Image (cartoon, helix red, strand yellow):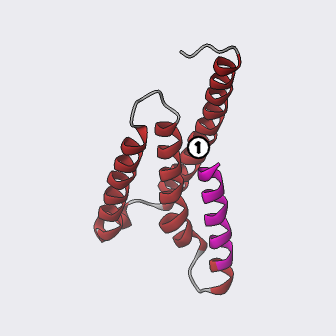
Amino acid sequence: MFGVVDLVIVMVFLAITYQTTILSLSDLVVNFLLPVNVSCCICFRVLYSRWEKSEYIAVLSCLVWVGLWMMIVANDVIYQKIVTPVWVAMLILTFVYFVFCVQKSLVFDEKILEDYTYEIRI
């Protein structure tokens, strides 16, 4: 729920920011929505795994992603070489993967609920 709510809040933020500033929608999507969407995908995938201490892995993975993203955005040569179709493709892929992760997490929750319903802990 946290990831979905976070994504909704960022989208509302983007809509308000787009209406009240002179920034282009593509700049807002690339600089806000894409990194948050990837972070949500990382959190969903890692937190709904069977790994122990998955919270630490999720935080570390998100920090690595943010560091990588900051290096890409800070380096103007790399940033300019990534053309708009690549940004759009990345955004579409992250949304598809996000939906996959949410669907998988719902199946995982259902399985856990079944295991506890029949008092079987796997």
What range is drawn magenta here? 1-16
Q: Name the element at disc 1.
A: helix
Viewer-nearest residue: 68 or 51: 51
Tell me the quarter of the picture where residue 101 sits: top right
As for residue 8 lying within the magenta part, the answer is yes
Where 97 falls versus 13 (above or below)? above
Q: Position of residue 112 (x, y in %)?
A: 62, 24
Q: Position of residue 63 (x, y in %)?
A: 35, 55
| Residue occupying the point 55% across, 44% down | 93
| Residue occupying the point 67% across, 33% down | 106
| Residue occupying the point 54% across, 47% down | 94
Q: Position of residue 120 (x, y in %)?
A: 61, 13
> For this view, does 32 lie left or right of residue 4?
left
Disc 1 residue crowd, few under 14, some 14–19, many 20+, Cα 10 Å: many
Where 54 falls versus 11 (above or below)? above
Where 21 falls versus 95 (above or below)? below
Viewer-nearest residue: 80 or 69: 69
Q: Position of residue 108 (x, y in %)?
A: 61, 27
> For this view, does 12 lie left or right of residue 84?
right
Viewer-nearest residue: 43 or 118: 118
Viewer-nearest residue: 34 or 107: 107
Residue position for label 1: 98
> For this view, does 79 lie left or right of residue 31?
left
Q: Residue furthest front?
A: 119
> For this view, does 22 lie left or right of residue 49?
right
Tell me the quarter of the picture where residue 28 sits: bottom right
As for residue 118 lying within the magenta part, the answer is no
Instruction: Look at label 1 and name its amino acid.
Output: Phe
| Residue occupying the point 67% across, 60% down | 8
